[in-house]
Image (tube, grey):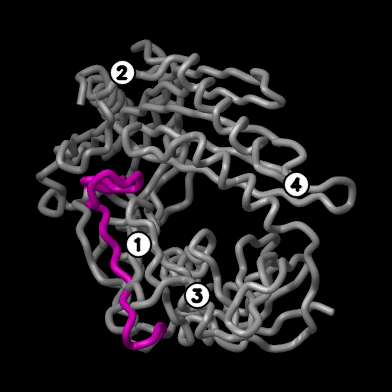
Amino acid sequence: MTKDLETLAAALLQAATRAGADAADAMALDGTALGIDTRGGRLEQAERAEGLEFGLRVLIGQRSAVVSGSDARPEVLAAMAERAVAMAREAPEDPYIGLADPALLARDVDAAALELFDAAAEPSPAELEQDAREAEAAAQAVRGVTQVDGASAHYSATRVHLAATNGFSGGYTRSSRSISCVAIAGSGLGMERDHDGDTRIFAADLRGAAEIGTRAGERAVERLSPRKPRTGAYPVIFDERISGSLIGHLAAAINGSAITRGASWLRDAMGEQVLPAALSLIEDPRRVRVPSSRPFDAEGLPTRARALVQDGVLQGWSLDLATARKLGLAPTGNAARGTSSAPSPTAWNLDLTQGGQSRAELIAETGRGLLVTSMIGSTINPNTGDYSRGAAGFWIENGEIAYPVSGVTLAGNLREMLLSLTPANDARPWLSRVVPSLRVEGLTLAGE
């Protein structure tokens, strides 16, 4: 980590101590973001952003306050710290806040082994524009595509440093490169759109722009002339593109914040079966070349791989220090924060056990049902797990894709849905959520 952010974080802590804080932590980050959008074969938008921002959390007894800024002049830092201390003195007491015990802090804060940053030269605007134009041209060349809603290419690099008065200090740098394209097929009321895209840490890993544009166009054409199947209960396959949303609902239900509020449909499920016995859900924040990987969390605790669900049985919650103290448990290194917010728990990289068959084999085995490739809207009851979402995709008849479907609603209960999962083996290993296509049995489909 370069010394400028480390020095800034240390200066923030010193200012907080001088202002009267009992303890404090600080986050400083800077970065560059460059984006190019094209439409109709022309450059539509070019953006470049560079900036510095930082946040300071001060603690006085069991009271705290958070302030943030972007002006790093010493007199400004001093004024920020004084304001934060004044705010903290007026804040309500929280018996669960506090920095980590020094014995719990991460010792290995070197992120190099995680390969979060591509050291290759920053791409020029011309390079990004070429990627966007190539994706757009490839989509437009697909027979049946009537227009391309746009193509984009983006690059970003961000440096982060975290420090606290308990002795922690560490940072890392991460980068990102992406290409995306949205294509439209048909005309008038019969228009359908779809997209494709890819985001990687290393530009060398990125899929080709032409491939992305072509797939976006093909997907849009495949959706033309959709129909609605009859209302009923059917097996539903959530395509790999969206299946991670189901696991996301599980992750949200075992988040420490939801558990401590009692606002989770899994609040009493510790040690119970929540997935089929053949499935496990592993969290691993140290996977190489994965965007959500990190060597430590936002409270300086070490990250580690652990089983959230083992052989179908729920093993634990995602906890930061405060929620762990509320529950009388050990923290799990899941704290996340921004420069203007206090830490809160979140899930890192998730990996669900894959099945032994391809998506095509899963479709063939299903016989009759719905393959969902996109979803809109969401009505999820966090207390009961009742689930209702709009969906589009393809009807399966006799084990084969029969026709496109749109304008239907799926309804069920997440507890029952997750217990009925059958996975394919098509998950993309470079994503933060490695989740294959998933079949759910007996969902209610509202169609015709």
Where is residue 283? Give x, y as percent.
Answer: 29, 63
Residue 26 or 122: which is nearer the viewer? Answer: 122
Residue 213 visible = yes
Where is residue 342? Give x, y as percent.
Answer: 41, 45
Q: CA distance from mark 1 to mark 2?
A: 30 Å
Quadrant assignment for the C terminus: bottom right
Q: Which residues are magenta?
A: 274-300
Q: Is residue 297 magenta?
A: yes
Residue 22 visible = no
Give the side of residue 349 with respect to residue 131, left or right.
left
Q: CA distance from mark 3 to mark 2?
A: 49 Å
Residue 80 or 50: which is nearer the viewer? Answer: 50
Residue on which the image places disc 3: 262
The earlier-in-sequence mark between 3 and 2 is 2
The three-letter code of the residue at mark 1 reads: Leu
Give the side of residue 154 with respect to residue 410, left or right.
left
* Secondary element at tag 3: loop
The residue shown at (35%, 70%) is 352
Residue on which the image places disc 4: 185
Q: Is residue 203 above or below residue 332?
A: above
The earlier-in-sequence mark between 1 and 4 is 4
Residue on which the image places disc 1: 350
Residue 258 or 233: which is nearer the viewer? Answer: 233
Q: Which mark is residue 333?
A: none
How would you rate the neighbour count of disc 4 (Cα within 10 Å): few for under 14, some for 14-19, many for 20 or more? many
| Camera-nearest label, 1 or 4 | 4
Quadrant assignment for the N terminus: top left
The residue shown at (57%, 78%) is 385
The earlier-in-sequence mark between 1 and 2 is 2
